[in-house]
Every structure is written in structure tokens, then in C-alpha cells.
Amino acid sequence: MPVITNIQDLKRIYERRVPRMFYDYAESGSWTEQTFRDNTSDFDKIRLRQRVAVDMAGRSTASQMIGQDVAMPVALAPVGLTGMQSADGEIKAARAAEAFGVPFTLSTMSINSIEEVAEATTKPFWFQLYTMKDEDYVSRLIQRAKDANCSALVITLDLQILGQRHKDLKNGLSAPPKLTPRTIANLMTKWAWGIEMLGAKRRDFGNIVGHVQGVSDTSQLGAWTAEQFDPSLDWGKVQKLMDMWDGKVILKGILDEDDARMAAKLGADAIVVSNHGGRQLDGALSSIRMLPRIMDAVGDSIEVHLDSGIRSGQDVLKALALGATGTMIGRAFVYGLGAMGQQGVTTALNVIHKELDTTMALCGQKSVRDLGRHNLLIPSDFEGHWQQ
């Protein structure tokens, strides 16, 4: 077993183990992938302020996200097709998050269903909702999340129309994989993944198949999904979904100050500053670059989390120091899941936690709650206002 010391170690194993179409699904962005690249490279532009001769004993990464105690302010982001990265991947990731003490968010486009994840875990998890044209399906999906005792609804706002992702189109992304000559050739090199997948509870979209009229199996799913994302989603519909849920709500996909203010006005419990991992509007600014502007816009009127680009505990610290209350990791935990299953997710969380704790100590801080801009050295152009 190789020694894992960082997230990149997990990524290398992941790439070797998982079929190309699912690796590309996670490790790609839309169009030219400029925003996808900026999400990580912009973190590198922020430097840390080292402090010495400061009492570093008794440090704590414990915090809260939407009132929930967390071992560190990191949640597992909603990621579609997680169950194709590793058999029963959503269950494995949820169990790892529960044991570590951080939130897990189940995607609408998961392989394992809400009910299957709830049955396999002992604590409430978050559920992420894509808004669909089929209002009856959405209503029943929300009720299913309630019945499963999900503790928060994460409404994704930035997928009314699907951004063009060249790799997914060229790979013919599907779950389970369509058996073309190219796919078969690749699957033959991923025999360990294939053997594991034979024992999976399911290999289709558990929250959709069997729950939508006219969609009883995977062959009917593609056409339904392609037509279902709701381009008419507006703030009025968001309010209706919030009222329907009547519980903790997180609005994900905020990348503009005005949208952040509107989310706060509606009474959401938190927003997630996110550009969908660079998979929607290519050319948008990175999440970390937008975070200071959004923090200045909303202040403490709403809890702010950050998603997109986090690959280390140092990235987590930088986001917290710029004002975020919490963060979300997607690709970082998927690398671990694809590489080593549940243990890989645990390893990814351990890596990020150790990096966060060590960096916090070397910055002279004892608690994540005390992090602030005083811990950072930020280039003068990083927070500059772009001409409109």
C-alpha cells in the first residue's frame, strides 16, 4: 500500500483504477476549462502569514456549519454519479463523513437512493436538490428527503441549463457505461473496479429510476433528464421550494454579490459560493476570488460556505480566513473514494484535517474560529473590481 501524504497521491491511484469516462466526469470543466483551472490556481496566489513564539498548544478545528457541530468546517459536496466511482459510493462516502464528524451531501443525481443511504447511516445527512420541470417529482423527492430525516436541503441554483463539457460528450457518459468498443477496451484495464461493481446495490440513478412516470429503467433515463432541468427557475420558485422544505436551507451556486444579497433576503440559512467546480459558465471568476466581494456584500447576514477548487487543508484555511464559515470538497473526496473506497474518503479527510491543523498552528492560531484576513498576504490585484 503506497504512503498517502496528500490529495494528489489519491488522485494518481484514482486515475489508474477508475474507468476513463468517470475519471473525466470528475476531473474536467466546461468549454476551455479556464474557470476549472482558476479555481485551484487562484488559491496558490494567496500567501500565508507565518507567526512564531505563539502558544500553539490545545488547538481545535471544531466548529459549526448551519448550527451543526463539525470536527472541521468541511462538508462533502454533492457529486453526481458517486456510486460509479466506487460500488455503493454514496454509502461509503456518507459513512466516512459520519465517522469523521463532517456533513455529507447526497446529490439528486446519485446512484444510491436517499433511502439506501439513510438505511446505511445513523446520523442525518444533507440532501441536494436539482429543480426539475416535473413539479410532482420534485415535491415527492423533497418529501422523501424529509422522511429520511435529512437535516438540510441544499438547492443548486446554477444548473438550469447544462454547461457543455466536451469530455463527457466525447466519452458518451452514462450509468452504467454503454458498452462501445472504446468503453470495453478501457474497462478491460480496470478489472478491479469491474469486479467490485458487480456487487453494487445498484448501477443506475436511485433517486429517479422507478420514481418518475415513464422511467422504469436506465434506457429511458437519458431522454427524461435532458429535458427536465428547469430553465425557468427564479427567486419566486426558490422561495416556494424553501417553504415546501420548511427546514434548514443552503443555496448553492452563488457567484455574484446581488445574488448573495437576494439569498440572504429570502432567509436562507447559508449560501455556497461556487461555480459548480468550473463545470457550468467557463470564464466566470474562481470561487475563492469572488469570496471577499461576497463577504463584503452580505457581512454576517447569512452564513457563507465556499466550494470549488479546494484540494488541501491550506485551501480550507484560506477560505475561512477570507470569511467563510465552512467549505465543501467534491473532487478531493472523490479521488479518495475511487482510489480506496470508504477508507480513501477517510484518508482524504485525514489529510485535509492534518494540513489545516498544522497550517493553523504555524500561522499562530489555536482555533479555526479565530482565523481572519490577518493570517493572509493577498496580492493587491486579487480583490480588485473588474470593470462592468
Image: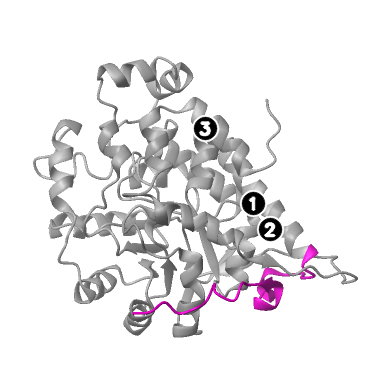
**x%, y% of residue 320?**
60, 69
Name the residue tied to disc 3: 14
**Decide: marks 1, 3 in contact (CB < 8 A)?**
no
Residue 210 vs 42, above or below: the answer is above
Would you call the spot at circle 3 few (<14 residues within 10 Å), some (14-19), or many (20 or more)?
many
Disc 2 or 3, which lies upstream in sequence? 3
Residue flagged by tag 3: what amino acid is it?
Answer: Tyr
Q: Is residue 361 left or right of residue 184?
A: right
Q: Secondary structure at mark 1?
A: helix
Name the residue tied to disc 2: 356
The reply to whether residue 232 is in sight is yes
Would you call the spot at circle 1 few (<14 residues within 10 Å), some (14-19), or many (20 or more)?
many
Reply yes or no: does residue 378 show up in magenta: yes
- Residue in the image at 46% along x and 71% along y: 290
- Mark on residue 327? none
Q: Is residue 72 left or right of residue 164?
A: right
Disc 1 or 3, which lies upstream in sequence? 3
Would you call the spot at circle 2 few (<14 residues within 10 Å), some (14-19), or many (20 or more)?
many
Residue flagged by tag 1: what amino acid is it?
Answer: Ile
Residue flagged by tag 2: what amino acid is it?
Answer: Leu
Name the residue tied to disc 1: 352
Foreground residue among 322 and 121: 322
Query: Which image quarter is the C terminus in?
Result: bottom left
The reply to whether residue 174 is in sight is no
* Residue 386 sits in quarter: bottom left
Foreground residue among 228 and 277: 277
Q: CA distance from mark 1 to mark 3?
A: 17 Å
**Decide: marks 2, 1 in contact (CB < 8 A)?**
yes
Which residue range is magenta in the image? 362-388
Residue 211 vs 77, above or below: the answer is above
